[in-house]
Amino acid sequence: MTAGGLPDPARVDPAVLGVLLARHGWRRRGGAAGRYSRWTPPGPPGGSTSLLVPDTAAYPDSEDLLGEALTALARSAAPSAREVLVSLAVPSDEIRWWRDVPEPAAGAASWTGSEQLHGAARQILLAGALAVRGRAGYHGARHRRRALATLGSVLIGPAPGGRDLTAFVPVAAGRPLAARLYQALHAAREAVDYQRATGGMEAFDSAVEAGVSRELTEAVIALVRGSEGAGIALEWAPAAGAPDGCPARPEPVEFSPGDLPALRLAGARYLRDEPAVTVRITGAVVRLRRSGPRGAGIVRLRVLAGAEVPHVRLELDEEAYRIAGQAHLVGLPVRVEGRLESRGGFRRLTRASQVVPVQVDEEERDRLMKSLQENVDYFEEACTGE
């Protein structure tokens, strides 16, 4: 980057800049053949902005021309100019969503439409990130923290009128997400077509391997609901090319309101059929509750190891509950075996057994003790009657 925040012209490939300009609707208006080309922004002709882009970086004035072109892009009022600069600064795969919605009154942008588009786009990105972590018909709370962390590097453009939105997924960190999302969206489209043609749901079962899940079907429903149709298109970063197994120019994927019943059926099927998982969890006790001084009680654990969920809730008999309470009071986590149930999003552990305290280093122990002091009201019942 230059001091002014623009990409360094010495590092900009003129061919990549040309691809990005064409992708975002800029028009090539000629120029000196073999030396440079002139580009103008989308919209009616006659605007003041035009760019001179060298055909290669081999000419003595190529870097100067690229610098002037980048400065002109930064000053351009065309929304696409910023998107081109973002893709140059951080080589990114682009994901674009659109919704066909009625024109709002007086040409004003729809606040609720923009919110819906942003929310649905985020859900779709999260579904893709979850599919990178593992294949499942229903992820629930599993892998969610790491999947959300993946989205931290994604850049989002404006959504004027709630109709169009573009996300820039950096190749360095997000290429697996973009590739998986391409496969999952096309598999979902094919499964919907099969269900609508035959009434069968088998295609949704095999689509799980491509990354389709309840999270994805719910996200697509959120995108389409209230519109006359919606779609998603992916474009690969020109400097990186297409991922393995993906076409150089992917076809957009479109969904209509008529697809919603199939997507809802698939989501319900995924939720119903995802099996429980046998796990051995190590976790810090963060809450204890029971109705009296003795008997069984409910414990909540912050998961440290053994499952890709942040917290689990479990019911323990009197002896196991006592062990959990004492372990917390002395700053120790516990290890417990059980079945992580899909109901409730894999946040509940059933058939809990083998509850034992686990030794930890002093730093972790001090941190757990601090947690007790901050949440002391939750643990009064742990001491009652013992």
Image (cartoon, rainbow, N blue to C red):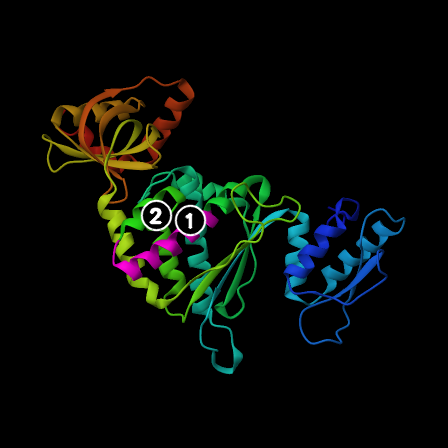
* Residue 358, position as x, y percentages in the image: 30, 19
For the residue pair 95 and 244, the one nearer the viewer reads as 244
Task: Answer above or below: position of 112 versus 11.
Answer: below
* Residue 253, position as x, y percentages in the image: 46, 58
What residue sits 77% from the left and 72% below the top?
Answer: 48
Q: Is residue 106 left or right of residue 67?
A: left
Task: Answer above or below: position of 68 versus 310.
Answer: below
Q: How many marks?
A: 2
| Residue sitting at the far front | 198
Residue 256, picture quadrant: bottom left
CA separation in Å, label 1 and label 2? 9 Å
* Residue 245 appears in the picture as rendered: yes
Task: Answer above or below: position of 44 versus 41.
Answer: below
Residue 134, picture quadrant: top left
Q: Is residue 28 left or right of residue 224?
A: right
| Residue sitting at the far right | 60
Which numbered mark, 1 or 2, is in the foreground of this view? Answer: 1
Q: Which residue is mark 1?
A: 184
Q: Which residue is mark 2?
A: 213
* Residue 380, position as x, y percentages in the image: 21, 33
For the residue pair 360 and 354, the one nearer the viewer reads as 354
Q: Amino acid at mark 2?
A: Ser
The image's mark for residue 384 is none
Q: Amino acid at mark 1?
A: Ala
Which stretch did the figure color magenta?
181-200
Disc 1 crowd, CA 10 A, few/some/many (<14, 14-19, 20+): many
Disc 2 crowd, CA 10 A, few/some/many (<14, 14-19, 20+): many
